Amino acid sequence: MKKIEISSYKVNGSLELSDYNTHENLGVTDKELKKELQKIRQDLGEFQDTMYAHSKYSVLICLQGIDTAGKDSLIREVFKDFNARGVVVHSFKVPTELERKHDYIWRHYIALPAKGKFGVFNRTHYENVLVTRVHPEYILGEHIPGIHSVEDIDQEFWDNRFKQINNFERHIAENGTIIFKFFLHLSKEEQRQRLLRRLALKRKNWKFSPDDLKERKLWDKYTKCYEEAVEKTSKPHAPWYIIPADNKKAARVIVASILLEELKKYKDIKEPELDDEIKANLEVYKRELENEKE
């Protein structure tokens, strides 16, 4: 299999999505990709068990991408071998009435993973500089002081919001959250094909909405918003990775590989040592159990 060069997916500096491929096969068959993913996700599951025992770090995985990019299936396949207690997935929809009574990051903050766990955000706090940027009228529902109309939402507003997101991520990183941010980079033609499949397959009809076609017409605008958001928020403590998403199986292997290779760099994540007294009496405890009568 082609070696996965993590640096080729990582965003450093200026960004134009057109410079990144949307398709990758890693030089192997689908069957080989499936086998590779099985191996990596088992290693990830073992790492999470150790991280749970260590209980000083958590991992936050942020997934963004245009509709049909493959976020749901990636979550299902990459984390299949995790202990159920070790990973929590949050899919963020339109904010509820309660959520709108708080600042836009609040609902994401309270969903952060506890120490020892993986948390996956399926759509993230970045919706607040993506969807709201394409549809700035949504901002009015946040009831922000000084924002009375769309005309009040200028570039300074978005720059401040990028700063707030950077501060949020820096804060949680400094307190033990390891952050990964993946943009699933889908081509417009592949999205068209996937939408057609949703219409053709009865069991997938429920996923289709006429709004999908309305949003598709805003493809170029979304692309520009993604470029600016990713460029301004890809930091050493919270990097963005651009993942080619036309081939779902390869995308899953790339994401899983990045997670495993980067997490292995945390050499301090180890199972805790037993108390000296307990360690010295292991044989005593063993004999006690072996000598128990049924």
Image: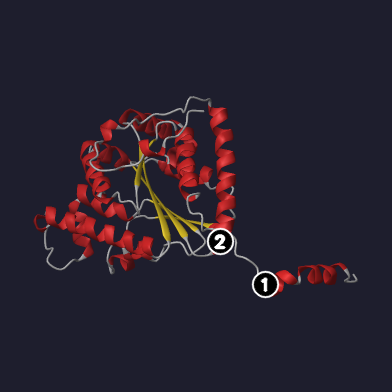
- Which numbered disc, 2 or 1, marks the residue that appears first in the sequence? 2
Q: Which residue is identified by label 1?
A: 276
Colour mapping = secondary structure
Residue 289's image quarter?
bottom right
Along the viewing direction, whichever of 259 and 205 lies nearer the viewer = 259
State the image coordinates of residue 136 (x, y, percent, origin top left). Answer: 18, 52
Left or right relative to 208: residue 275: right
Left or right relative to 259: residue 64: left
The answer to whether marks 2 and 1 mark residues whose Cβ atoms lie closer than 8 Å is: no
Specify the amino acid type for callout 1: Asp
State the image coordinates of residue 11 (x, y, percent, origin top left). Answer: 31, 42
Along the viewing direction, whichever of 235 and 253 lies nearer the viewer = 235
Report how many numbered discs are placed on residues in the image. 2
State the image coordinates of residue 74 (x, y, percent, origin top left). Answer: 47, 42
- What is the distance, in whole Å, between disc 2 and disc 1 at their CAs? 21 Å
Specify the amino acid type for callout 2: Tyr
Along the viewing direction, whichever of 148 and 180 lies nearer the viewer = 180
Q: Is 191 located above or below residue 41 in the figure? A: above
Residue at 45 percent across and 43 percent down: it is 258
Residue at 43 percent across and 42 percent down: it is 206
Residue 73 appears anywhere in the view: no
Residue sitting farthest toward the bottom: 277
Along the viewing direction, whichever of 128 and 267 lies nearer the viewer = 267
**Numbered mark located on residue 170 in the image:** none
Residue at 56 percent across and 52 percent down: it is 47
Residue 156's image quarter?
bottom left
Judged from the image, the secondary structure of the residue bearing numbered disc 1 is helix
Residue 32 appears anywhere in the view: yes
Q: Which residue is identified by label 2?
A: 52
Judged from the image, the secondary structure of the residue bearing numbered disc 2 is helix
Residue at 18 percent across and 59 percent down: it is 160
Residue sitting farthest toward the right: 293
